[in-house]
Amino acid sequence: MLFNSYAFWIFLAVVWAAYRVLPHRGQNLLLLAASYYFYGSWDWRFLPLILTVTVVGYGTALGIEASASAKRRRLLMAASASVSLGLLGFFKYWGFFTTSAAELLGALGFHADLRVLNIILPVGISFYTFQTMSYTIDVYRGSIKATRCFTDFALYVAYFPQLVAGPIERSTSLIPQITSPRTVRRGDFSEGLHLILLGLFLKVVVGDNLGFIANGVFAAEPGKLTGTEALVGIYGFAFQIYGDFAGYSSIARGVSKWLGIDLMTNFRMPYLARNPTEFWQRWHISLSSWLRDYLYIPLGGNRGSTGRTYCNLMLTMLLGGLWHGAAWTFLAWGGLHGLILCSYRVFGERLKLPGRWGHILATLGFFQLICLGWLFFRADSMAQAWEMLGLIFSRQELTPLARYGFGMLGFFCLPLMGYEIWLNRAGSLRRLEAVRWGWRAAAYCYFVFMLIVFPPPVFGQFIYFQF
């Protein structure tokens, strides 16, 4: 049930109509039933999986809060984390680790017949396991009280607008909104409409149209591409994944607004960042802040020696890469971002350029580093990534495909980047809502016009569903 499908909007209309007439307890039960139906529409066989994660998180949190023994609290915390990470590891990484181990043993001269199971990856498992873990950790730290009502906690885990691709909500933010009665707030409908229209534009118009080009480039046979065409593919994927993922997050926030619940902002014009620290404060904020608060800081953060800080950064980014998928390309992507973070810590101040043009050059230069990372993220294998990287520096040729690709990049991306620069200068994602209604209506008409007139050749599933 995709956000860009008629089935979802019919589903939402039915849920919303019933939601408006129910009392608070009835609203929560309705949302929980709708969330399980939404998740089960992907594959009903994985409903016991999300229910298992929910039961373990609920029970261990109550045990942690009730226990006066520090040792028992640690054991319960470890048990909860072990179940979440164990399920995540089995479904997502079993094949990767067994295959890699077999290849390593084979390279050392040993014959290894390790069984590799063909395991289906449950949609959204990385998101709801991390969300449940953060709740248990927060209860362990004393940041929030354990939720006594099982259905309220189950709704926190399974809340359908953000269930399968985030944002990864914190218990301290979402649970109080679930347990407290919700009222109709002035401006929720208009803000939700703005977020939904923007999200559909990002996903369907920008993400899917440029994804069609990027997918074609990355699917080309070895030796058939030029370096310029490889660049088109990389830039196309950069805006495909941004439009796709930011679009999902925007629609999720807009739908949730209509239900009277606020979800966190997950993107803040990330391609306007000038350095890696700023980028991770703008891109997939819910994951980057999760890794910071629950991994990087507990490892020691930047409180130790410089070498220890760099090790913590590298480990955090490598695990962040592995979170995205079980492949060496994702580890390479995470490792590259770790190296970029460490390098900017060493040389960042020396690389700063003064003035407005220095700001622009820093932004453009860092965007190239982001795209270098996207090459490894998108490539089907390390061999393909190195081949395309080599082409970029050895075989530049402006072919008809390259001209077409750059033209499409300009057509779909320049208006978006102009809009984001306008937002960035005001320092507000809601600047459009503050302008006169005529300008706001013109922007909405542009979104709708582009959705109608420039549908993608192929409507793609949201990229982050596979993570």
Image (cartoon, grey):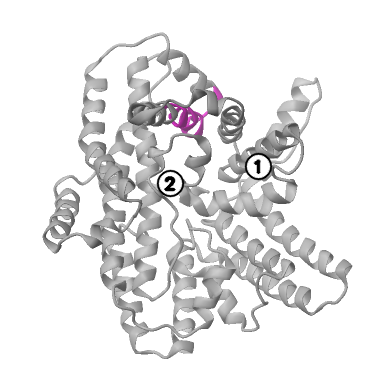
Looking at the rendered structure, the kind of residue marked 1 is Thr
- The quarter of the picture where residue 371 lies is top left
Nearest the camera: 427 or 262? Answer: 427
Looking at the rendered structure, the kind of residue marked 2 is Ile
Residue annotated with mark 2: 463
- The quarter of the picture where residue 250 lies is bottom left
Residue annotated with mark 1: 316
Q: Residue furthest top?
A: 394
| Figure check: 23 above or below 340 | below
What's the magenta bit mostly, secondary-structure-wise?
Answer: helix
Q: Secondary structure at mark 2?
A: helix
| Figure check: 344 above or below 248 | above
Residue located 38% across and 75% down the image: 259
| Figure check: 255 above or below 327 | below
The alpha-carbon separation of the residues under discs 2 and 1 comes to 22 Å
- Residue 314, given in percent of the width and then of the height, sits at 66, 35
Span shown in magenta? 368-382
Q: Residue furthest front?
A: 355
The mark that comes first in sequence, 2 or 1, is 1
Q: Secondary structure at mark 1?
A: helix
- Residue 462 is one of the magenta-drawn residues: no
